[in-house]
Amino acid sequence: MGEIHDGSCLCGAVRFRAHGALREIVACHCAQCRKQTGLFYAATNVKRTDLTIEGEEAMTWYAASNFARRGFCATCGSAMFWQENDGAWISILAGSFDTPLEGKIGRHIFCEGRAQFYDIEDGAPQYRKGSPGLSVAPA
C-alpha cells in the first residue's frame, strides 16, 4: 500500500490522508502565499486521486487566480491546500500533517516576493519566480 500521511486543520474539522510518496517541500514566497499565511507557503504534494479529505463540507475553496485555487478550513481558517485548476496534483501545506515530515525545504520559489523582514539562509536553491519542473501560477 505504500506510505500514508495523515493531517488536519487546527480545529480538526478537516482531516486528510495522503497515500504514497510526497514531493520535496517547496517554500513559496509570492505575495499571495505571504498574505494567506503571514510568512511563506511550505508545501509538498500528491496526486489528487491519492488524497482523501474528510470534512470537506467545512472547507472553503478560494479562486485565488484564474490558474489555481486555495483550500482552507472555514471554521478555524487553517490554510491547507493549493491546486491548479483541474490539476492532477494537489499541494498540501507541510505544517498541516499530524506527524513531522522527513527532510528539509528542497527549494524556494518566487523569492522576489518575500517579505523583507527575513532572510533565506538554509542553502536550498532559490528562484526569483518558479523553478524548472514545478507547476506554478503565471507571474
Image (spheres, helix red, strand yellow):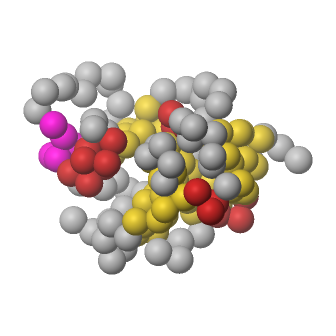
Q: Position of residue 17 (x, y in %)?
A: 72, 47
Task: Say if residue 110 shows up in the picture.
Answer: no
Give the quarter of the image for residue 138.
bottom left
Q: Is residue 57 above or below residue 5?
A: below
Q: Is residue 112 magenta?
A: yes
Q: Check the image and name the residue furthest to the left.
A: 116
Of residues 98 and 136, which is closer to you in this image? 98
The residue sitting at 11% across, 32% down in the picture is 116
The residue sitting at 44% across, 32% down in the picture is 105
Does residue 8 appear left or right of residue 128 in this picture?
Answer: right
Of residues 17 and 61, which is closer to you in this image? 61
Q: Is residue 76 magenta?
A: no
**Where, quadrant-wise, is the C terminus in this rendering?**
bottom left
Does residue 18 appear left or right of residue 130 in this picture?
Answer: right
The residue sitting at 55% across, 26% down in the picture is 103
Q: Is residue 108 above or below residue 121?
A: below
Q: Check the image and name the residue furthest to the front.
A: 75
Of residues 7 and 58, which is closer to you in this image? 58
The residue sitting at 50% across, 48% down in the picture is 75
Does residue 133 appear left or right of residue 121 in this picture?
Answer: right
Q: Position of residue 132 (x, y in %)?
A: 38, 56
Bounds of the magenta segment: 110-115
Of residues 63 and 129, which is closer to you in this image? 63
Task: Say if residue 69 shows up in the picture.
Answer: yes
Does residue 138 appear left or right of residue 16 in this picture?
Answer: left
